[in-house]
Image (cartoon, grey):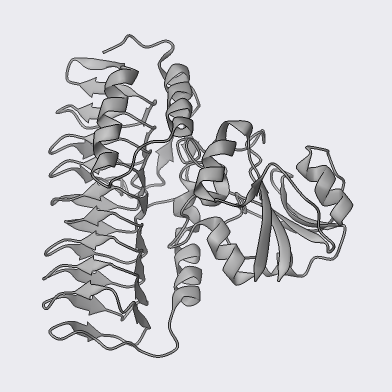
Amino acid sequence: MTPAIFFDDAGSRTARLAPLTDLRASFDIRTGALTTMERLKLALDLDVIAVRTPESLAQLTRERHPGLAVNAFSGSTAPVLLINGRCPVSYEVIASLETGQSVIEEASGDLVAALASPADAAAFMQGANVAFKPVATLSGTALLARPWHVRTFRDDCIASDLELLGDAEPPEVPPGVTVFGEHGLTIDPTAKIYPGVIIDLEHGPVAIGQEVTIRPGAILIGPCAFLPHCTVLDKALIKGNTAIGPHCKVAGEVGGTIFQGFSNKGHDGHLGDSYIGEWVNLGAGTTNSNLLNTYGEVISVASPGMSNEKTGQQFFGAVIGDHVKTAICTRIMTGAILHTGSMFAQTAAVSGCVGGFQWSTDAGRKAFRFDKFLEVAKAAMKRRKIEPSQAMIARLSALHETATRAVAPA
């Protein structure tokens, strides 16, 4: 195994990834069925010995990865592979690096990966500007730099993940479950799949993980993945290139969407070509658009105050940050970016970029008071028998202060 360090270069002048990285490092974003670090660790046979993150995320990263060195490095006897946490796909060029060599993204000049000597790895972890010899450049978009890049990389990531997660031998199909198509099917022995479920493998494989529940009448169309402890409710339609993260509940029509984890879409409504953070609750009938009436390229705004940008996508729905809540029958327009902690209870369609911790009604938008936000967050998390840590509360408070500084309180 190759010793490796993943780093979050949040200070990069080119990257604006919020809300994806509000509560997690870039390598912990679920960019497919797996997070970026999980994927590259498996694909490249890595021994992750440390990670480097902004100090604002250091304690949360320690909680996500108990026992892993965060912003600390005890040394190595072998060269160490440094990997940018914004690099979601296992490029073969990374595995072929020799000591002192690096790969960069051509457009930005940002470091994608480097193979460092132990001394250079130690200096890098201390924040030194270590010089590596670029031996390859990756053209186009090689690193996540905007929230919609989870859509850009989605198909390649899910395809890679399903190959990594697939079983060599076909599983025993539960009684009453219909399976057709030639692609692979993986079912963990602890999963519960009810009679009446249809699994379509014509266009890609399906992976069903530990303690997953698939209720009667659900239709699963590959390629798609269901992570541990998630539930697909009765008569749901789950279309291709979808990954349902751990402890999620989904219903209705969902396609081309990644759920980070611990979120609910428990009722009918369409959700397409989107990313859903943690602790999101989409009210009954919440529906999004993932295609413009003109069939043109979707234009989006990453963060409040930024300019419109081309996403490079014809099909792109929304990026919905952690702890966002929508009321019944909420409509979300194409290319919407909804930042952490916002609440939507409006009859008008939600569109554009909405900053964090906003309370949106037909009367307008106001700042979501932090005490009320935290009360709601604790109630939602308690349903999963989880309490927010002090580090999580402190991080949310800091995000709230920044997001609502110029907004009147609700």
- Residue located at (34% from left, 55% from top): 257
Q: Position of residue 53 (x, y in %)?
A: 63, 40
Q: Position of residue 98 (x, y in %)?
A: 84, 66
- Residue located at (45% from left, 88% from top): 168
In-front residue for pair 329/393: 393
For this view, does 53 lie left or right of residue 318?
A: right
- Residue located at (38% from left, 36% from top): 388
In-front residue for pair 191/409: 191
Q: Position of residue 3 (x, y in %)?
A: 73, 63
Q: Position of residue 177 (x, y in %)?
A: 17, 82
In-front residue for pair 66/180: 66
- Residue located at (80% from left, 56% from top): 102
For this view, does 8 lie left or right of residue 389?
A: right
Quarter holding residue 184: bottom left
Please give the count of numbered marks on the rendered protein: 0
- Residue 304, visible in the rendered structure: no
For this view, does 331 lie left or right of residue 73?
A: left
Image quarter of the N terminus: bottom right
- Residue 398, visible in the rendered structure: yes
Please determine whether, in this image, residue 394 is positioned above or below residue 214.
above
